[in-house]
Image: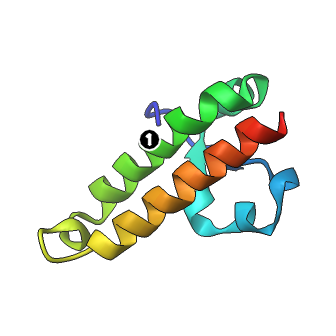
């Protein structure tokens, strides 16, 4: 996320919110500073980390996101993101 060495793989939506939070699309590598930040303000960090994660995946796998590739993956990821964020906001 920031360029510092990664110390932890962070679950963007907390594990306490159910089994779907263990899905690979809910994880992002973070340095210790950003991992602490993510835990200090979960509701604020969730949409930011989801956007950063999507940007990271696009950067790492650019050929998967061409005009005719990866669109279904992107749509499914967006559905997971928005459904999950609303669930977290409703529960807190």
Q: Which residue is mark 1?
A: 52
Q: Quadrant of residue 27?
A: bottom right
On screen, residue 9 above or below 36: below
Residue 34: % across, % down:
62, 29
Name which residue lies at 55% across and 63% down: 25
Residue extending farthest front:
90
On screen, residue 25 above or below 3: below
The quarter of the image holding the C terminus is top right
Would residue 7 be seen by someone viewing this image from the given angle? no
Residue 87: % across, % down:
72, 48
Q: Nearer the viewer, residue 47 or 90?
A: 90
Residue 1: % across, % down:
47, 37
Would residue 84 be seen by someone viewing this image from the given angle? yes
Instruction: Classify residue 61 as left or right of residue 89.
Output: left
Q: Quadrant of residue 64?
A: bottom left
Name which residue lies at 28% across and 73% down: 70
Query: How many discs appear?
Result: 1
Name which residue lies at 72% across and 23% down: 41
Q: Nearer the viewer, residue 72 or 32?
A: 72
Instruction: Classify residue 70 as left or right of residue 4.
Output: left
Which SS class for mark 1? helix
Name which residue lies at 76% across and 39% down: 90
- The colour scheme of the drawn protein is rainbow
Q: Nearer the viewer, residue 40 or 47?
A: 47
Residue extending farthest left:
67
The crowding category of the residue bearing disc 1, from other C-alpha atoms within 10 Å (few below 14, some 14 to 19, many at least 20), is some
């Amino acid at each position: 996320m920031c360029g510092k060495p990664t110390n932890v793989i962070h679950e963007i939506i907390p594990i306490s919110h159910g089994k779907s939070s263990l899905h690979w699309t809910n994880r992002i590598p973070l340095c210790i500073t950003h991992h602490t930040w993510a835990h200090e303000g979960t509701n604020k960090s969730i949409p930011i980390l989801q956007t950063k994660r999507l940007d990271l995946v696009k950067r790492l796998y650019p050929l998967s996101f061409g005009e005719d590739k990866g669109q279904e993956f992107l749509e499914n990821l967006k559905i997971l993101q928005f459904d999950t964020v609303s669930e977290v906001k409703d529960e807190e």
